[in-house]
Amino acid sequence: MVTLFDPRSGSKGKGSSTIYAAVSLLGRDNLFRSTDAGGTWQAVPGQPTQYRPTHMVMASDGTLQPLLRIVARPQPDDRWRHLEVRPASGAWSDITPVKPDPAQNQMFGYAAVAVDSHNPRVAIASTLGA
């Protein structure tokens, strides 16, 4: 499970009320949001259920950028994707910089993601097995 607290939903002396939790549920909703500090949870709308989240960060503009991957055996690394969601609108985008190509023996994945604190449109993804 991966959790992320939205720092914009808290203040000094008061914790964040918006929390994201990602779980590994293939074929089902796997990214959830609470807006009442964990009291209740709802699935983030529009999410692709063929991926399993492994890492996520929030950009300074509020764009949640989870790194999601498809789990497909025996070589799961050849189908990793870097997706982003805009929680306010529920819009999802595939922003994978380079997609692995098993036909060309390019079977790598993305292990982590970071977002430039000054420019939320700049994301850095590290590779795994490249």
Image (spheres, rainbow, N blue to C red):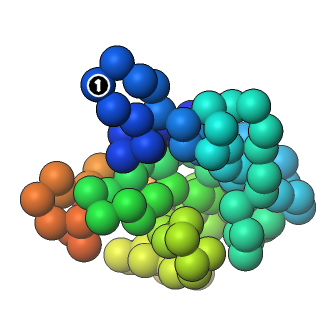
Q: Is residue 12 visible?
A: yes
Residue lying at 36% horizontally and 75% vertically, measured from the top left: 97
Viewer-nearest residue: 62 or 55: 62
Q: Residue furthest left?
A: 118
Residue lying at 51% horizontally and 79% vertically, measured from the top left: 94
Q: Which residue is mark 1?
A: 12
Left or right position of 105 against 115:
right
Q: Is residue 126 visible?
A: no
User: Is 74 situated above or below 3?
Assistant: below
User: Is 126 situated above or below 120?
Assistant: above
Q: Residue furthest right?
A: 27
Quadrant of res 75:
bottom right
Viewer-nearest residue: 41 or 36: 36
Residue lying at 38% horizontally and 61% vertically, measured from the top left: 62
Looking at the picture, how far across and down is residue 113, in whole percent? 36, 51
Residue lying at 78% horizontally and 67% vertically, measured from the top left: 50
* Kind of residue at badge 1: Lys
The quadrant in which the C terminus is found is bottom left
